[in-house]
């Protein structure tokens, strides 16, 4: 019998009773499992065997986070409300990014109200902006975001929104910001914009995580 292995196991179990599932226990359990596999001993699977990882998985079709936003805006002297839902759309072709990750594409249902009356409703997909994006980048991109365009918040002639088409990885260079202007008759004009200003989806977004490290 391997007494060194027995001592290590007893030591780890004692710590487990006292400290529960801390990072130390995960490290010790991993070391025990690795050591036991080397000497040919059988071990039972525990919760500590499973590593929780974040980020996209190469072996699966990934989804971006879904979200809903709403707000109010004045156009032509009248106050309107808008709401939209950014959602995964498995009915569209799966996109393979430049890094080889697979993603479901997304769609956005935008609805604009005047009081209780719906004056505009439209579903945007990546295809809505295909003419603005080079073919090679378009093929590897998804509809990666949608938001109200605060760069145009002082203009009250139309409704202004921003769509982003690009690689789901925000560090990628493949990203196109598209300004959307919608008039009161439902007419749409789109163009590539260099500068955007959108409201955060939640308090953790649109903020540099290293901003306060200095």
Image (cartoon, rainbow, N blue to C red):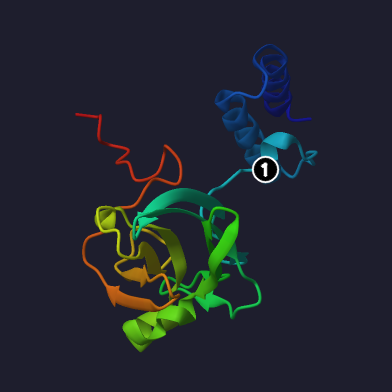
> With respect to residue 175, does 202 lie above or below?
above
> With respect to residue 50, does 98 lie above or below?
below
**Residue found at x 34% / y 52%:** 198
In the picture, which quadrant includes the C terminus? top left
Q: Where residue 164 appears, x then y in whole percent?
A: 38, 66
| Residue closer to the observer: 67 or 11 | 67
Q: Where residue 143 appears, x then y in whole percent?
A: 46, 69
Residue behind mark 1: 50
| Residue closer to the observer: 45 or 107 | 107
Point out the residue furthest to the front here. 77
Q: Is residue 102 left or right of residue 193?
A: right
Q: Is residue 164 left or right of residue 91?
A: left
- Would residue 70 be seen by someone viewing this image from the given angle? yes
Q: Quadrant of residue 202?
A: top left
Q: Quadrant of residue 103?
A: bottom right
Callout 1: helix, strand or loop?
loop
**Residue found at x 74% / y 24%:** 6
Q: Is residue 144 left or right of residue 64?
A: left
Point out the residue furthest to the left here. 214
Q: Where residue 156 appears, x then y in whole percent?
A: 30, 59
> With respect to residue 128, does 56 lie above or below?
above
| Residue closer to the observer: 119 or 160 | 119
**Residue found at x 40% / y 44%:** 205
Q: Quadrant of residue 80?
A: bottom left
- Would residue 109 be seen by someone viewing this image from the given angle? no
In the picture, which quadrant includes the N terminus? top right
> With respect to residue 37, does 74 lie above or below?
below
| Residue closer to the observer: 64 or 117 | 117
Count of numbered badges drawn on the protein: 1
Q: Is residue 34 left or right of residue 181?
A: right
């Amino acid at each position: 019998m391997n007494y060194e292995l027995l001592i290590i196991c007893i030591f780890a179990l004692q710590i487990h009773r006292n400290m529960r599932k801390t990072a130390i226990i995960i490290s010790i359990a991993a070391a025990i499992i690795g050591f036991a596999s080397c000497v040919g001993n059988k071990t039972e699977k525990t919760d500590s065997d499973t590593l929780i990882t974040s980020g996209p998985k190469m072996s699966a079709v990934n989804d971006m986070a879904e979200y809903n936003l709403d707000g109010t805006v004045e156009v032509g002297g009248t106050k309107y409300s808008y709401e939209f839902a950014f959602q995964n759309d498995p009915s569209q072709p799966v996109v393979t990014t430049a890094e080889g990750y697979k993603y479901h594409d997304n769609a956005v249902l935008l609805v604009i109200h005047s009081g209780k009356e719906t004056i505009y409703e439209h579903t945007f997909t990546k295809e809505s902006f295909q003419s603005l994006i080079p073919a090679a980048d378009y093929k590897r991109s998804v509809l990666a975001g949608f938001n109200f365009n605060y760069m145009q918040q002082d203009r009250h002639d139309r409704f202004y929104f921003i769509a982003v088409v690009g690689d789901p990885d925000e560090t990628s260079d493949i990203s196109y910001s598209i300004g959307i202007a919608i008039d009161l008759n439902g007419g749409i004009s789109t163009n590539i914009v260099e500068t955007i200003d959108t409201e955060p989806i939640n308090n953790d977004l649109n903020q540099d995580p290293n901003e306060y490290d200095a």
